[in-house]
Amino acid sequence: MDRKQHIAIFTTASLPWMTGTAVNPLFRAAYLAKDGERKVTLVIPWLSLKDQKLVYPNNTAFGSPSEQESFIRQWLEERTAFISGFAIRFYPGKFAVDKRSILPVGDISEIIPDEEADIAVLEEPEHLTWFHHGKRWKTKFRLVIGIIHTNYLEYVKREKNGQFQAFLLKYVNSWVVSIYCHKVIRLSAATQYYPRSIICNVHGVNPKFLEIGKERFEQQHSSNHQAFTKGAYYIGKMIWNKGYGELLQLLNNHQKELAGLEIDLYGNGEDSDQVKEAANKLKLTVRVHPGRDHADPLFHDYKVFLNPSTTDVVCTTTAEALAMGKIVVCANHPSNDFFKQFPNCRIYDDDNGFVEATCKALSEEPVPLTDAQRYELSWEAATERFLKVSELNQVFATEREKNSSKEFASVSLNLWKSMEDTSAYFHYLALGFETTRRAFGAIPGSLQPDEEQRKELGLATSSKHSL
């Protein structure tokens, strides 16, 4: 009874890929483990050298999982200033070039021993379970919490035959999340709706950004020195659907009203050349630069962060800009609801509103954040929100069912459970054959790890799975 509660956090990416599903679960693991009250394991994908070259920046590559773990821990400790007490384990993954995503190989729930299988947190549960073939998550773990990070439907709608693809994806996502998760947390209302879900931003910002904001505030008030000497900028992966399309369209349509505006764009991505070409056609001064770490001193002097993106769920760079004390101009969109509480967040409804908000932001000074507002952006506050909405200390759903005192309720629960079990078994059967896996969109050969992956990760030889 005195055994510590074990939380296993599974995610779809890992450093040095600087994407939200690599960074945010890492901070979540660190802050959940910080007080020592629970045992925490972060479970992340291990890629072959071939895939590492496709995913990781600056030709970064690791010869072993332990080498990558050392890199991750050093990166984290440089930002949190405390030594984290959580474990890191790796599951075999493969990079899907067409989806620009890492997908699990084999039954990744096996990474956690049965005796430690208390609580699983699935970061992007739909992504982790689309092609899952193995033990059912709800059977393996007493409580499974899914955290919805990505607005997949919005991305798919922008592709060829997007509306039809989004229609199918909506039902596939609902199906796998319902059969594998007890509880679902949506970071914002910008995500797909799921039954039994709650909306709560359970993410915080890297503590470095809060430190930068504090330094700027002190600098601004301890001398006559101007805290922000540069104007407007935007940072993000340089692909059209990450805000660049909306931003360049707004700038193009309102060049006359925004005459004199200078803006710097920072990012790397598949559409970099097209973005540069579009920027060069404008009469406004729009400079395009390679991507940099948002905490780089280069960004400290900018006063205004322009972010018209509507594909985000909760934009990490917007939170970081607010933490650094900047004014943020962003669209009136569900993904930005959390940020409306901060005085430096300027929301616009239409093109004219964007022009007005941008001009006003450039002419004003940011309002200093209060201690309470800084705390709201922190990972400490995000962890408190997560513990509250996930109800980790509550009686688990399976135990509530056993103690049901009403016969009708018991029959209803059993009927629902029977239907869900049937649905889960159908998914298990369908994803057990290479042909149907390929039809669903899985990577060829992803049903089981290959021998190289097994050797690198120290996994047992291939065996059959049971539901």
Image (spheres, rainbow, N blue to C red):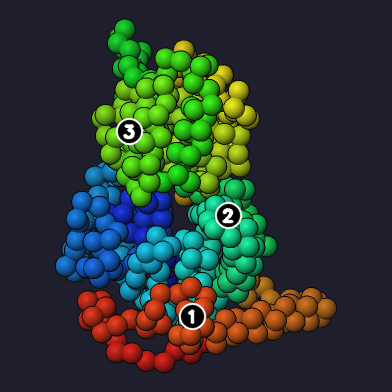
Marks 3 and 2, the one that precedes in the sequence: 2
Figure quadrant of residue 207: top left
As displayed, is residue 258 above or below residue 179?
above
Question: Nearer the observer, disc 1 or disc 3?
Answer: 3
Marks 1 and 3, the one that precedes in the sequence: 3
Near-viewer residue (108 or 287): 287
As displayed, is residue 338 above or below residue 313?
above
- Disc number placed over residue 157 in the picture, else none: 2
As displayed, is residue 454 above or below residue 364?
below
Label 1: how many residues lie within 10 Å, few (<14), some (14-19) or many (20+)?
Answer: many
Q: Position of residue 294 (x, y in %)?
A: 32, 37
Q: CA distance from mark 1 to mark 3?
A: 41 Å
Q: Residue furthest front?
A: 281
User: What secondary structure is found at the residue carrying circle 2?
Assistant: helix
Amino acid of disc 1: Arg
Residue designated by label 1: 437
Residue at left 60%, top 84%?
426
Q: Is residue 367 visible?
A: no
Figure quadrant of residue 87: bottom left
As displayed, is residue 370 above or below residue 439?
above
Q: Is residue 300 visible?
A: yes
Residue at left 25%, top 49%?
75
Horizontal placement of 113 versus 171: left or right?
left
Amino acid of disc 3: Val
Marks 2 and 1, the one that precedes in the sequence: 2
Near-viewer residue (283 or 288): 283
Residue designated by label 3: 288
Residue at left 34%, top 43%?
272
